[in-house]
Amino acid sequence: MIDASRLIGSHDVLFVTLDTLRYDVARDALAAGRTPHLAAVLPGGQWEERQSPGSFTYAAHHAFFAGFLPTPVAPVRHPRLFARPLSR
């Protein structure tokens, strides 16, 4: 796992969103070999099941750029990976 908070401010970040892409559809397309180019850039060559911080595109994108990224489905508190640390 990349510690994104260490990259912000020192690296360029390309943020790609795939609007309305369901996990089950993406997983099945990958397993069938229909998305070889995406497979090459996915961590471990696999999709991760995640939950969006918003229930529709506008709200979800606002949350993404505030540091609330899609989180794993496990019900625990997840870090804000893109949040800039507070300076002291």
Image (cartoon, helix red, strand yellow):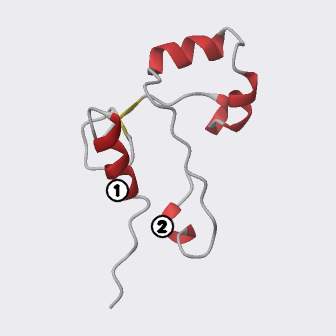
**Residue at the top extreme, as displayed:** 32
Q: Residue 87 lies in what quarter of the image?
A: bottom left
Residue designated by label 2:
5
Relative to 41, is 83 above or below?
below
- Does the CB distance between marks 2 and 1 fall below 8 Å? yes
Residue 35 figure quarter: top right
* Residue 53 circle label: none
**Residue at 55% across, 28% down:** 47
Type of amino acid at the residue the image marks with label 1? Pro
Q: Where is residue 77 drawn, in percent x and y?
A: 25, 49
From the top left corner, tell me how far across and down residue 68 is, in percent.
Answer: 34, 52
Q: Tell me the SS state at disc 2.
A: helix
Q: Residue at x 32, y 41 (%)?
A: 58
Q: How many marks on residues?
A: 2
| Secondary element at tag 1 | loop
Residue 38 rendering spot, x and y as whole percentages? 68, 30
| Quadrant that contains the C terminus | bottom left
Q: Tell me which label, 2 or 1, sits earlier in the chain.
A: 2
Task: Measure the alpha-carbon separation of dots 2 and 1.
Answer: 10 Å
Q: Using the image, determine if residue 51 lies above or below residue 31.
A: below
Residue in view at x 27 percent, y 39 percent: 54
Q: Is residue 84 above or below residue 71?
A: below
Few, some or many residues within 10 Å of mark 1 (<14, 14–19, 20+): few
Residue that sits furthest to the bottom in the current view: 88
Looking at numbered disc 2 in the image, what kind of residue is underneath it? Ser
The residue that mark 1 highlights is 79
Give the class, few, some or many, for how many residues have Cα within 10 Å of label 2's Cα (few <14, many ≥20).
some
